[in-house]
């Protein structure tokens, strides 16, 4: 408490420095009030600081250019409050765009920084909105991003006009006339407008909903979207079974004598064109001149030997 009192007293005695960095503040309103008190630069001052930054990498000049335009970021951020994202985050991303603009600003182009920086500020805010407005991206290409922001603002304008005209038929979705008008104004296909409208109207859905109050698990998309065939453990097991069914069985058959191998192949591995299996126990018994029971015993012994070989192979 003593240190804080001393710091406040020292700052009160110190000369006012409007270019000092905005100190950490308790809330967003205090930040906005602070940046609005920062002085604006004249065109001559702006050109002078920009040349110092470009020619001498003067960071103090860069700071003055940035600080004098923080109010611009606050103003632009208000245009995007309807997306349900915190204004503080929008301002933060806009400040990143402002710093990029200051770094790339060329004083020889004879334009004000405010005109040049607006593009960079909006670009960073747009990118932030597209990344955070939905878990799944609604716009990936440059054309889709342009359509996303233009369509949303135009839709809000049409709905506001409809309310003013007491249009009781106003709905959340666009009418055919509105779709045609938007497509013509934005110079895109009506199908593209309809697709983006569908993306805008859809919300995020939890793949695995939380259990309800009674402990029962709610039915969610995870129940019918999951593909067990591509689960890593299942894929490894399937691959192992494929190897056993080919290389493993071939290696196990090599361990058998000719008669045992033929009995196993006829009884378990042979499939005729009509879908039937190979020879029966009695057919094999007649061929080898032994009883069917003897063929069965040979088959059992061969299968045990192959099972052992397959276990070692796996």
Image: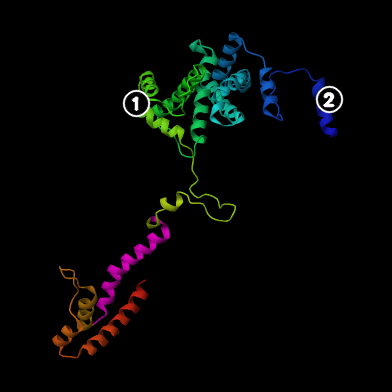
Q: Percent x, y for residue 192?
A: 36, 29
At 31% from the left edge and 65% from the top edge, which residue is drawn? 242
Q: Nearer the viewer, residue 150 or 248?
A: 150
Label 2 sits on residue? 9
| Quarter of the rendering occupied by the C terminus | bottom left
Residue segment shown in magenta: 230-256
Query: Is residue 234 magenta-colored?
Result: yes
Q: Quadrant of residue 264?
A: bottom left
Query: Is residue 158 magenta-colored?
Result: no
Q: Quadrant of residue 40?
A: top right
8 versus 113 height, above or below: below
Q: Which of marks 2 and 1 is nearer the N terminus?
A: 2
Q: Are marks 2 and 1 in contact (CB under 8 Å)?
A: no
Q: Is residue 61 left or right of residue 108?
A: right
Query: Is residue 130 visible in the rendered structure shown here?
Result: yes
Q: How is the image coloured?
A: rainbow
* Marker disc for residue 190: 1
At 49% from the left edge and 25% from the top edge, which residue is drawn? 123
Q: Which of 296 and 201 is in front in this view?
A: 201
Q: In this view, does 156 lie to the left or right of 15?
A: left
Q: At numbered mark 1, what does the secondary structure look like: helix, strand or loop? A: helix
């Amino acid at each position: 408490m003593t240190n804080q009192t001393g710091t406040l007293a020292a700052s009160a005695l110190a000369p006012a420095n409007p270019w000092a960095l905005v100190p950490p503040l308790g809330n967003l309103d205090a930040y906005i009030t602070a940046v609005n008190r920062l002085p604006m630069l004249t065109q001559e001052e702006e050109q002078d600081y920009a040349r110092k930054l470009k020619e001498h990498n003067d960071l103090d000049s860069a700071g003055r250019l940035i600080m004098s335009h923080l109010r611009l970021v606050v103003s632009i951020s208000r245009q995007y409050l309807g997306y349900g994202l915190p204004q503080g985050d929008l301002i933060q991303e806009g400040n990143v765009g402002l710093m990029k603009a200051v770094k790339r600003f060329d004083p020889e182009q004879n334009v004000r920084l405010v005109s040049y920086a607006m593009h960079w500020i909006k670009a960073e805010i747009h990118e932030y909105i597209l990344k955070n407005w939905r878990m799944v991206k609604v716009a990936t290409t440059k054309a889709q991003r342009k359509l996303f922001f233009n369509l949303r603002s135009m839709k809000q304008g049409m709905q506001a006009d409809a309310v003013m005209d007491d249009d009781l038929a106003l709905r959340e979705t666009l009418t055919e006339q509105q779709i045609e008008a938007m497509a013509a104004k934005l110079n895109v296909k009506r199908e593209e407008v309809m697709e983006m409208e569908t993306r805008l109207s859809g919300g995020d859905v939890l793949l695995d909903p939380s259990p309800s109050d009674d402990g029962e698990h709610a039915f969610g998309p995870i129940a019918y979207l999951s593909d067990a065939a591509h689960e890593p453990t299942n894929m490894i097991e399937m691959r192992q079974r494929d190897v056993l069914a080919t290389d493993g069985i071939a290696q196990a058959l090599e361990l058998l004598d000719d008669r045992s191998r033929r009995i196993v192949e006829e009884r378990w591995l042979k499939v005729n064109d009509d879908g039937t299996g190979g020879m029966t126990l009695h057919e094999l018994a007649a061929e080898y001149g032994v009883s069917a029971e003897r063929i069965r015993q040979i088959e059992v012994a061969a299968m045990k030997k192959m099972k052992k070989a397959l276990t070692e192979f796996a």
